[in-house]
Amino acid sequence: MTDFTQNLLPKLKARRIAGITLDENMQVPAYDGYCLANIAGSLCRWLGLDEWPTHPLNEVYCSPFRKEYDQVILLVMDGMGLKLFQQTSGEADSEYSPWQELMAASHLYPVTSIVPSTTSAALTAFWTGCTPAQHGITGYEMWLREYNMAANMISHMPAFFDGPAGSLRQTGFDPKTFLDVPTLGPFLTRAGIDPFVLQHNSIARSGLSTMLFDQTQAIPIRGMNDLFTTLEELACQDSFQKRFLYGYLGDLDELQHVYGPEDVRVKEEFRNFQRALCRLASHLRKAGNKKTLILVTADHGQIPSAPLKKYQVNQVPELINCLHLLPTGESRLPYLHIRPGQVEKVREIIEVKWPGDFLVLQTEEAIQSGLFGNEPYHRELNSRLGDLILASRNEAYLYWPHKENKLLGRHGGLSREEMLIPLLIFDC
């Protein structure tokens, strides 16, 4: 394996942004070619298309793979941070020789997630090539001023109400027109390239999927084996057109939320992924009928999290009284929409109730620093980010849903565990 982590990781960790002093162990997103948002631009070039408008990956990622490919496969394993990938890969080296062989033929790079380091914002970045500042998806829960409500951006339903997924449509919300930036599906289709999306049946027609995957061929799958078997069949089919095959796996993320990032179930799930990936690579090389490039990456990592009562917002009524609505965003990166004249009081409450647990950022300063990406800014960016942003230190977070707080793993914040992800590239 050609491992670029030793060379690139110190440079990524040393990154700083003007205007905001983050803690030493917080990771700045590298939107200028070292970030998951840059993958779209590069995969278009690998498919022979130079017209995609967003910034591609830096040349260090692309130079070993200069040729044009018949198909590109992008596999996104939700929650697979760089730390987890390196630890579990190392443990597998002596146990599973096909993985050793695959790694020997691969290039491993570190890249950063985006801010916030969460699925709704990251998958939108994959499929638009834009940063959150540009595409406007700023978290799991987001204040939508134009619809006068906070919304869950995975299920597209009101954040604080029980109801059917997709119920935002009742307000006039249309997921197909909600984004203000182009997505990959129509662009590839117009260029004569077939885009396929493989993800679990339970989310294949979700609000987020409808928003991102316009003009793609959706293939619902029912588990990891189904996904990889279907990928093998598709990738080996005869076709006069080039193809982009996107596969998304969410179980690793769910296991970390439920059991914690260090649990044995998490490692076993990753090992199942390793075996399936080895089988796919072997199958494609034996078929030998197409030039295929495979990219394996993630949307974010996770950090251990204890369900502590002290981080529950309902335990701090004086804070709630200062807000227009409950926090939005991520538990590890909450956005506070504050009543007029209450900003300094909110700062005091945070310092008294959670001393040293949060770095408090003024929203306008965070935007101007480029924490969420550079201009052109989405027209609703400021309203969606509120007045103050809390960047969680160590394992701190805020919890505000009206249900039991029981997650043992979280993400969305700026720690290196959440922000650093792997990018594995090899061709067949």
Image (spheres, helix red, strand yellow):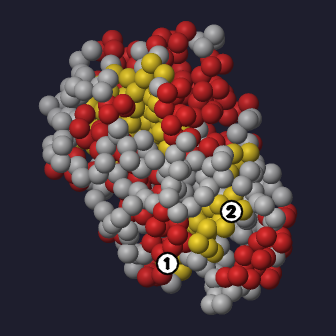
Is 52 above or below relative to 309? above
Whether the residues at callouts 2 and 1 have beta carbons within 8 Å, the answer is no
Residue 154 circle label? none
Q: Report which residue position mark 2 lands on.
A: 359
Tell me which corner region of the image, top left, top right, bottom left or bottom right, holds residue 420.
top right
Name the amino acid type tagged 1. Answer: Ser
245 on left or right of 119? left
Q: Position of residue 286 (x, y in %)?
A: 33, 11
Residue at (66% x, 90% y) in the render: 341
Taking the image as shown, residue 277 lies to the left or right of residue 84, namely left
Mark 1 = which residue? 383
Q: Quadrant of residue 47?
A: top left
In front: label 2 or label 1:
2
Residue type pointed to by label 2 = Leu
Residue found at x 33% / y 19%: 428
Q: Is residue 27 above or below residue 68?
A: below
Dot 1 alpha-carbon crowd within 10 angstroms: few under 14, some 14 to 19, many 20 or more: some
State the CA–CA distance, disc 2 to disc 1: 20 Å
Residue 133 sits above or below residue 16 on the image: below
Q: Secondary structure at mark 2?
A: strand
The location of residue 187, given as percent across then percent down, is: 22, 51
In the figure, is residue 98 to the left or right of 402?
left
- Whole-percent x and y of residue 316? 81, 76
Q: Give whichever of discs 2 and 1 has the lower sequence position.
A: 2
Q: Secondary structure at mark 1?
A: helix
Front one among 162 and 114: 114
Q: Residue furthest bottom?
A: 340
| Mark 2 crowdedness (10 Å alpha carbons): few <14, some 14-19, many ≥20 | some
| Residue at screen point 72% across, 55% down | 393
